[in-house]
Structures are given as structure tokens and as C-alpha cells.
Amino acid sequence: MQYPYIRIDSADPFERGVQYGTQAKEQICKAREYYSGVMAARGMAWNDVCRFADRYAQKIHDFAPDLIEEIKGIAKGAGLTEGDVLGINLRYEIAKFGSFPECTTGVALPEATASKTTLAFKNWDFAQGVMDHIVVIHITAGDTKILGLTEAGQLIRDGFTNWGLCLNANNLQSARDHEGYGIPATILRRKALMSRSFEEAAEVIRTAPRTVSSNILLSDVANGRAIDFEWHPDGQDEMLPVDGIVTHANHFVMHPELDGITGRPKNRDLRLRELLMAEHGNITVETIMNALRDHKYYPLSLCGHPDPEAGAYGKNRITVSSMITDYANGCAWICAGPPCEGEYVRYEL
């Protein structure tokens, strides 16, 4: 199994959107139908979701005018409304999806790897239903190239660039999250990945207005640096690698009292670090692949599989994709579905 590969190439943001929407129309429509059902189960009609999402348009325009144009192009290419595409991009803010663990991220800097280069990686754990509309996306926007994964219609979820930046994100839910109009996570991630330097991307993350929380692992894979941002409505706390390694899951580490969900398991980031530290100085792409296949603490393991007996956290949770960024070799290794069952496929930047 491989996810559809969408290749976009234009310096004009609206045209980029049209190319995206045209190529991924089937998957974007599936995303719309999926989230229409999810929101209906929460008592929200899709038309209300779209009206709510439309209120973000001006804030997005003020923050990144090129990206609101790209959203308009996606809508045109897919034959949907701008509100539909905004709704798909805002699913995180609207619903928060805090009922099960969502992702585990990490980075290994040169001191920890066999090749003395930086490797960034992630298992994306989410609901099974999204697997019908995930795409691999390759964007050429003038002299910037981005390769990553996303739900169809969203601007990006995780990816890396020819400027040597990599961004991997995790769900966080804090006690301070609130309604309002901040910068949606998909917009923030894409804006950061359009940056040309680690410092510029970090400033985008630090200064963007926010009403909800997220964890953002930003890596300078070209120069061996990383910062993990625990991003919340009152600011952000920044965690640096220790011994050349940083890992994160779906709970606050710097200030645990910020967690908005009590009783959340806190094992995946520690388990990933344990596996990587066992190979410190000799970590390879294969080392990381094997770590991301790990089933210790199943059903709440690094490699996720649905378990009807697992309760709210695990009954619908699955690793929908796994990605390892190997910037030194200009590629990412992506597995569709749980990495213990699938094959990592190489994609060139």
C-alpha cells in the first residue's frame, strides 16, 4: 500500500492550489465527507463548520496571504467551496481530537547517528478513517521545495525542505485551550516550512497567535540543530535535545500541569528514547525503522493498532503513517499504515 503522490509546481499560490485540488480531488472529497460525519456525531452540521472556518479567512490572510490564496485554489481545483477546504484545514482547532494518542516524534542529531548527519522521524497515530484521504505531497514553490504528508486538502502536516528544515507535529491539549481565532495548525506548519532558515521558522512558531496547543518539533536537518516547542495559548516552552536526541508524544513535559487530559499514558516518548539511546552513536535509518515498529506497552505502543478492548485511547487508534527524513540523502522514507506491516518507500525531495 502507498498513499497517492501529489506533485505541485508553481510560484503562484493560487495555481499551486488548483494543481493540488485537481490532482487530489477524490481524496479531498473523501476528507470532507469523513469530517462531515465526525462533526455530525459531535452535533455540528458541516455547513456550521464551514461558516465557523470562514471566520478565520481574514486572520490567515493577515498572517500568510499567499496561503489563503492557495486554499482558494485548492477549492477551485477540487470543485468545493473555500469553506469546505478551510473546514478540513481547521479540523484540529474545531474538534481537538484529544481522545486517543496521536503521534510520536523524534530527532537524532549527528552525535547520535552512524552517518554523523541528522535524522528526523515520526509515527502518525490517528483514526483509521483518515487513511482513505492521506496523500504524500511534493511542493515546488519558486525556489522552495517541500516533501511531506498530509490529509488531502490540508496545506501540510509534516515535512522537510530543500532549505534544510524539518517539522513534525503532535497533538497537545492543555487546560488553557479556549475558543477564539488563532492561526490554524496547518497554516502555521506550512508557513514555518516556507522559511529559509531555522531562525526564521522558529520565529514564526514563537510569534503566531494561538488559542489551542500543539507540539512542534523543528529540526535544522542541514546543520544538526533542533528545538521542540510545547506550544500553548500563553506562549511556548522549548525543549532541546539531550545527548543529541529529543523525543515527544502527546503530553506536556516541561510543565505537566498544563495537560488538559488527566490519566494520559506517558510512555511512548520515553520508549522511543530508550530504543535510540541503546544505539547512540550508531543510529541509522534502519535503527529508527525498527524502533518505530516497537510494540512494547501495546495497545498504546509506538506502532499502533486498533484494539476494541483498549478503551477510549486505543479502540480506534492506528499508526496511519511513519516517516523518516534523511536530508543528507535528499529523501524521506514513508510507510503507509503501521510500519510493522508495511514497507518504507523512498521519496526524493
Image: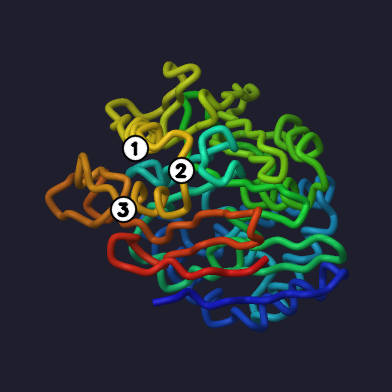
Location of residue 276 by image quarter:
top left
The single residue placed furthest to the left in the displayed view is: 309
Where does residue 257 sit, x and y in percent of width and height?
Answer: 43, 16
297 relative to 329, above or below: above
Q: Position of residue 66 (x, y in %)?
A: 84, 59
Q: Which residue is mark 1?
A: 275
Q: Indicate left or right for 182 with 143 as reference.
A: left
What secondary structure is marked by label 1? helix
Mark 1 and mark 3 lie on one chain; the one further toward the N terminus is 1
Q: Which residue is mark 2?
A: 283
Location of the N terminus (image quadrant): bottom left
- Asked if residue 226 lies left or right of residue 104, the reply is right
Q: Which residue is nearer to you in this view: 146 or 169?
A: 146
- Residue nearest the observer in this picture, 88 or 251: 251
Callout 2: few (<14), some (14-19), or many (20+) C-alpha neighbours within 10 Å?
Answer: many
Residue at the spot 29% in from the left edge and 52% down from the top edge: 304
For disc 3, the neighbor class at 10 Å (few under 14, some 14 to 19, many from 20) is many
Residue 16 location (% of width, % of height):
77, 72
Q: CA distance from mark 2 to mark 3?
A: 15 Å
Q: Does 347 sit above or below residue 59?
A: below
Numbered tag placed on residue 285 in the rendering: none
**CB atoms of marks 2 and 1 within 8 Å:** no
Q: Which mark lies nearer to you, 1 or 3? A: 1
Q: Determine the secondary structure under disc 2.
A: loop
Residue at the image position 48 percent from the left and 28 percent from the top: 174
Q: Earlier in the sequence, mark 2 or mark 1?
A: 1
**Residue 134: x percent and y percent?**
49, 68
Which amino acid type is shown beneath numbered disc 3?
Arg
The answer to whether the residues at label 2 and label 3 have Cβ atoms under 8 Å apart is no
Residue identified by numbered label 3: 293
